[in-house]
């Protein structure tokens, strides 16, 4: 465990140092990602105003809070993608990583975790600017703030596990693009990324309870901007832990069978 801890701390320090060296690039990347939530925010705020001031319990100020927090959660959810796994397997990059006495996934988790600390620091000024423009209604309790902190890291780990699972499909299929696009479409609808889950039809909300998607977007956002009870907050964290454990077990199982089929095929 000490060796793993040393590896994670060192990898995260290197990632933090590297990303601060490219802080301008990171800023422009984050600014580019703001376009999506701002469009959602403007559309739903306009709808709320036309519907008498609120839609599904969300006022324009509540929508502003939702989508501003969305920008941080979205950046926290950036992980090593299936396309990365595809290239890693196709081009034989995995061969070098197999020589290391540690699973490649640990390197991915540690590097992107270090990057998240940079993301949080760079996000704060952007959030302040958006708050000045859109005037969010945000009044969280201390419990909500604490749960939100753990929930965004839980979301990061859940998404890491399931996108890694998709990436490892390329042990069998060589390419994963079509499968990933289907996964992305489901995530868009069932996660709260497009609209808050409370605005979706009842059957969609019910289905999302049995899938990992909403625990990577809607739960952490709603934990801070909504009005969940303490029991709902703690239950949500428990469900996140269950998805993380389940995802880890599936990744290990996929790796066990997939690595036997590994061979690079080039471009």
Image (cartoon, helix red, strand yellow):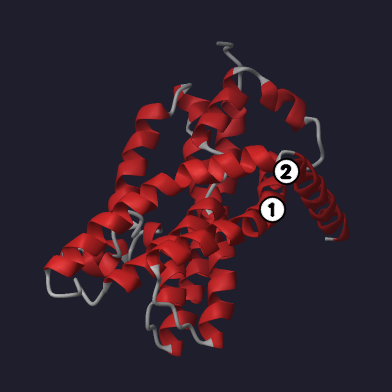
Is the residue 161 above or below the residue 239 in the image? above
Viewer-proximal residue among 26 and 164: 26
The quadrant holding residue 56 is bottom left
Q: Disc 1 and disc 2: Cα gap in Å?
A: 7 Å
The single residue placed furthest to the front in the displayed view is: 133
Where is residue 148? Give x, y as percent.
Answer: 53, 73
Viewer-proximal residue among 16 and 256: 16
Viewer-proximal residue among 52 and 66: 52
Marks 1,2: beta carbons within 8 A:
yes
Q: Quadrant of the N terminus?
A: bottom right
Where is residue 169? Give x, y as percent.
Answer: 47, 33
Secondary structure beneath dot 2 equals helix
Q: Which residue is mark 1?
A: 118
Residue density around tag 1, few if under 14, some if 14–19, many if 20 or more, within 10 Å = some
- Picture residue at 32% right of the left edge, 67% below the top: 63
Where is residue 192? Give x, y as percent.
Answer: 33, 60
Q: Which residue is mark 2?
A: 19
């Amino acid at each position: 465990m000490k060796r793993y801890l040393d590896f994670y701390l060192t990898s995260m320090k290197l990632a933090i140092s590297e990303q601060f060296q490219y802080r301008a690039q990171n800023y422009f990347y984050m600014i580019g990602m703001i376009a999506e939530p701002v469009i959602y925010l403007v559309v739903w705020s306009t709808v709320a105003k036309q519907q008498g001031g609120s839609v599904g319990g969300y006022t324009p100020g509540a929508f502003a809070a939702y989508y501003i927090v969305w920008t941080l959660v979205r950046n926290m959810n950036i992980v090593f993608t299936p396309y990365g796994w595809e290239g890693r397997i196709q081009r034989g990059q995995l061969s070098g990583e197999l020589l290391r006495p540690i699973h490649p996934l640990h390197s991915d988790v540690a590097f992107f975790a270090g990057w998240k600390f940079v993301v949080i620091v760079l996000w704060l000024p952007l959030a302040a600017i958006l708050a000045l423009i859109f005037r969010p209604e945000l009044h969280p309790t201390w419990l909500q703030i604490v749960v939100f902190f753990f929930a965004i890291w839980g979301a990061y780990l859940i998404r890491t596990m399931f996108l890694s699972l998709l990436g490892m499909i390329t042990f069998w299929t060589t390419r994963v693009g079509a499968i990933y696009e289907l996964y992305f479409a489901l995530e868009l609808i069932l996660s709260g990324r497009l609209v808050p889950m409370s605005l979706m039809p009842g059957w969609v909300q019910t289905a999302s309870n049995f899938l990992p998607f909403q625990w990577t977007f809607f739960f952490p956002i709603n934990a801070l901007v909504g009005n969940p009870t303490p029991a709902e907050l703690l239950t949500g964290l428990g469900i996140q832990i269950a998805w993380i454990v389940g995802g880890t077990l599936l990744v290990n199982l996929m790796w066990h069978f997939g690595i036997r089929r590994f061979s690079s095929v080039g471009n």
